[in-house]
Image: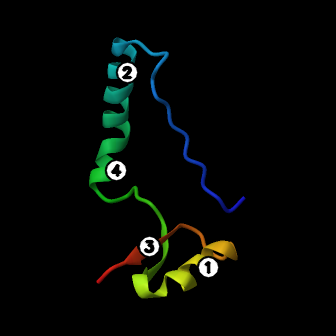
Amino acid sequence: MRRIRYLGTMFRTRSADEVDAIQQQVRADRWPALEAGRLGVPIDAVFPISQASEAFNLMKANGHFGKIVLTHA
């Protein structure tokens, strides 16, 4: 129950008009929250690339909620 499931679609079965209507609705409903920074991807931990094995161990232990980020700086 700790995992977020993202669902998407390729719109293969939708007409161009349907896709346009969906895009307009998403833009009206979700875009303001996205631009305001109220929507985003949860980040659990940030590791330098030199600690990639520690990041992997955290992921393998299922001890995180959100993304594990590796940085190169």
According to the picture, the residue beneath numbered tag 3 turns out to be 69
Q: Is residue 6 left or right of residue 26?
A: right
Q: Mark 4 or mark 2, which has the lower sequence index?
A: 2
Q: At which x and y percent is residue 44?
A: 51, 74
Which quarter of the rendered picture does the N terminus lie within?
bottom right
Q: Nearer the viewer, residue 56 or 43?
A: 56
Cβ atoms under marks 1 and 3 closer than 8 Å: no
Q: Mark 3 or mark 2, which has the lower sequence index?
A: 2
Amino acid type at circle 1 is Leu
Give the mark toward the camera: 4 or 2.
2
According to the picture, the residue beneath numbered tag 2 turns out to be 19
According to the picture, the residue beneath numbered tag 1 turns out to be 58
Q: Mark 1 or mark 3, which has the lower sequence index?
A: 1
Q: Is residue 9 left or right of residue 29?
A: right
Q: Is residue 67 left or right of residue 63?
A: left
The residue sitting at 44% across, 73% down in the picture is 69
Q: Label 2's element?
A: helix
Cβ atoms under marks 2 and 1 closer than 8 Å: no
Q: Nearer the viewer, residue 38 or 10?
A: 10
Which quarter of the rendered picture does the C terminus lie within?
bottom left
The residue sitting at 31% across, 43% down in the picture is 31
Q: Above or below — where is 71 with respect to 30?
A: below
Amino acid type at circle 4 is Ala
Q: Mark 1 or mark 4, which has the lower sequence index?
A: 4
Q: CA distance from mark 3 to mark 4?
A: 23 Å
According to the picture, the residue beneath numbered tag 4 turns out to be 33
Q: Mark 2 or mark 1, which has the lower sequence index?
A: 2
Q: Mark 3 or mark 4, which has the lower sequence index?
A: 4
